[in-house]
Amino acid sequence: MAKKLIDLVGITKSYGDKVILDDMNLFMNENRFLTLLGPSGCGKTTTLRIIGGFETPDKGKVIFDGKDITSMPPNERNLNTVFQKYALFTHMNIEENIAFGLKIKNKSKSYIKDKVKYALKLVNLDGFEKRMPDSLSGGQQQRIAIARAIVNEPKVLLLDEPLGALDLKMRQDMQYELIRLKNELGITFIYVTHDQEEALTMSDTIVVMNQGYIQQIGTPEDIYNEPQNAFVADFIGESNIIGATMVKDKVVDILGTKFACVDEGFGTNKPVDVVIRPEDIVITEKDKGIINGRVISAIFKGVHYEMEIDACGFEWLVHSTVMAEPGKEVGMWVDPFNIQIMNKPESEDEKVLVEE
Ligand SMILES: Nc1ncnc2c1ncn2[C@@H]1O[C@H](COP(=O)(O)OP(=O)(O)O)[C@@H](O)[C@H]1O
Ligand SMILES: [Mg+2]
């Protein structure tokens, strides 16, 4: 059984009259890689800062290891934060940068030396002790920032878009580095990003947020394959999201055509949203699929062709290794298993955001 490490209970936070987090409840288990994922401004950093102790919630509690730490200052919490801007001390060498926190804690010279060596090894930068920060690449500087956080042996590392300033290749390398680091250290990582691919690659658990509300919590597979609402489906990848009617169990009417699906329990003739991933649509000859459509465009994307197909008044996005010529009439077929039924969003806000 995983042990609960951090528990956010009824967290509410406003800036002025703007409510940023509204009665948020979320627990985090020990030794997990948990990611808060959502668009810019949805409250991810605010949540992290509340966990780190840099902000105090207006209401609610932060429980850490069973203890209420809501008003405990950051340096007394058993966690460390790594920010997007690495903020190394430019006038200090790498060793001094990493040792800084330990010196403040009055640790012995030999203890500090050992810890610095260990931390540099962990981030694959052994031998960099005497280098100055500005002689390092962005990725290396960010590793130093991480080394500086882990010498304190925190139980939790909080990471706020730490790869955001790096170029794509470096970012991908660092994603693997972070997974390795997390496994070697055996501690909890709480990671914030607005990048869905990054979240899917690295996390054990993803918490999808929108406008201060948690939309879904699950494994990357859950979130991708079974989004609970149109916001999650749209945010987490390219999708066909279509308003439809659940006729009865296992039958959904999409744009006037009845499709077999596997979902049950939505009731009869109930409005729903369906999600069909572009790679789950199979192109057939005309009249051999469930519906017919006309190909509007086809672009080669390397592994697959990306096509837009107009069918029943909707432009379907289709990914396939087989190209259909623009202008051609084709059939489309979807495995019942790949039709994901979702409840309509509850608030009008969510709806507006999805349709933008
Ligand atoms: N110190 C602050 N004062 C006023 N508004 C703030 C402050 N910090 C954040 N906000 C606002 O709170 C909202 C959520 O911000 P944030 O938690 O940084 O979002 P995210 O990290 O998801 O992009 C934004 O609308 C932001 O403008
Ligand atoms: Mg942020």
Image: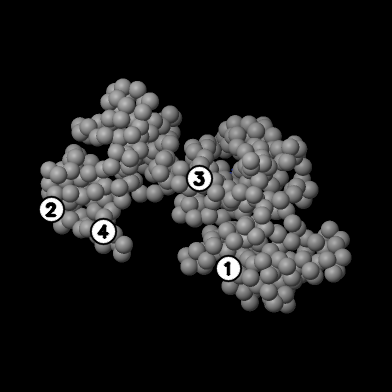
Q: Quadrant of the C terminus?
A: top left
Q: Position of residue 255 (x, y in %)?
A: 22, 34
Left/right placement of residue 51 relative to residue 346 reads right
Disc 1 target residue: 139
- Other residues around mark 1 within 10 Å, as few (<14) / some (14–19) / many (≥20): some
Q: Quadrant of the N terminus?
A: top right
Q: Indicate which label's residue lies in the foreground, 3 or 2.
A: 3
First of labels 1, 2 by sequence position: 1
Disc 4 target residue: 321
Of 147 and 340, nearer the camera is: 340
Disc 3 target residue: 219
> Which residue is painted at 25% across and 31% down in the image?
253
Disc 2 marks a residue whose amino acid type is: Gly
First of labels 4, 1 by sequence position: 1
What is the distance, in whole Å, between disc 1 and disc 3 at their CAs?
27 Å
What is the distance, in whole Å, between disc 1 and disc 2 at their CAs?
47 Å
When asked about the image quadrant of residue 315, the answer is: top left
Q: In the rendered view, would you say 11 is above or below 288?
A: above
Residue found at the far front of this picture: 1
Disc 3 marks a residue whose amino acid type is: Thr
Disc 1 marks a residue whose amino acid type is: Gly
First of labels 3, 2 by sequence position: 3
Query: Cβ(mark 1) to ligand 2 < 8 Å?
Result: no
What is the distance, in whole Å, between disc 4 and disc 1 at their CAs?
36 Å
Q: Position of residue 88 (x, y in %)?
A: 68, 65
Question: Total number of numbered labels?
Answer: 4
> Which residue is painted at 59% across and 31% down in the image?
23
> Which residue is painted at 64% across and 49% down in the image?
31
Of 246 and 93, nearer the camera is: 246
> Which residue is painted at 20% across and 55% down in the image?
297
